[in-house]
Amino acid sequence: MDSMRIIEVKQSIFADNDEDANKLRSRLKEQKTFLLNMMSSPGSGKTTTLVRTINALSDRLRIGVMEADIDSDVDAWTIAEKTSAKTIQLHTGGMCHLDADMTRQGLKELGTEEIDLAVLENVGNLVCPAEFDTGASKNVMILSVPEGHDKPLKYPLIFTVCDALIINKIDVLPYFDFDMDLVREYAKRRNPKLKIFPICAKTGEGMEAWCDWLYQEVMEWNK
């Protein structure tokens, strides 16, 4: 038994990733490129929200998008067809998240020299993406009304690591047992500094406040 050793592999992996993420963040700061990491469950409306956001800001910012999926290029084509943003597709080969090195590779292919705002649409998942620092300037997550107001209790980490929470599909609030006051309370319990933006990406309701916040964050980062 004395010859048996226990290696904390998980800790080592996260430590290495955090170092890579900090290096990437510093490099992006020097280049004056803001990286937004967008996370959510599948079907929350990430791509629709992103299309609305790009079209609202495209006259003020040069925007590039990295669409991350286990497979398919459906979302990348949607962005390319409905916006003017430069878009690339990232396939994760079955992995349910992106880490800092994967993000670095994606940014290299996207090219950041003439981009003010780079958006990483992460793999649809409320668990794995939250565990890995991608090197982003800010993290944002989308929670849709049909998912329920209890998600900050069930998936605490993603609410903790995010800087902003978008609550999408508020147009269907009358048809679901979703308590806006409770979700705010639960989310703020996890992260008191969390910015919260109720929106409907389909109709555009609430998008102005979200886009204004994002624009100001990009301007501050790129000073």
Image (cartoon, rainbow, N blue to C red):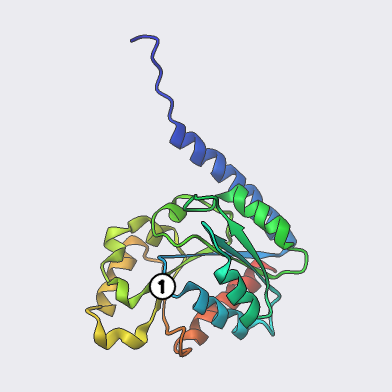
Q: Which residue is mark 1?
A: 44
- Give the percent coordinates (x, y) of residue 167: 39, 76
Report which quarter residue 169 is drawn in.
bottom left
Residue at disc 1, secondary structure: loop
Residue under the image location 35 percent in, 88 percent down: 171
Residue, x 46% and y 90% (percent of image)? 203
How many dots with numbers?
Answer: 1
Image coords of residue 100 (percent x, y): 59, 50
- Image coordinates of residue 60 in percent, x first then y, are 69, 82
Is disc 1 surrounded by few (<14), some (14 to 19) or many (20+) residues within 10 Å? many
Seen at 39% across and 55% down, the residue is: 127
Q: Which residue appears farthest toward the front when viewing the image?
A: 72
The part of the image, by quadrant, that contains residue 112 is bottom right
Q: Residue at x 61, y 79 (%)?
A: 54
From where the camera sits, is residue 184 visible? no
Image height of 102 relative to 119, above or below? above
Task: Answer left or right for 143 relative to 54.
Answer: left
Is residue 177 placed above or below 204 in the rendered structure? above
- Farthest residue, direction top: 2
Q: Is residue 161 visible?
A: yes
Front position in the image: 154 or 124: 124
Which image quadrant is residue 162 in? Answer: bottom left
Q: Is residue 2 above or below residue 17?
A: above
Is 49 left or right of 63, judged from the image as shown? left
The quarter of the image holding the N terminus is: top left
**Kind of residue indicated by mark 1:** Ser
Most distant residue in the right direction: 113
Q: Position of residue 178 (x, y in %)?
A: 25, 78
Quadrant location, the C terminus: bottom right
- Apparent side of residue 152 relative to residue 84 in the rendered image (left or right): left
Could you say which is closer to the camera, residue 14 or residue 78? 78
Establish if 62 lies above or below 170: above
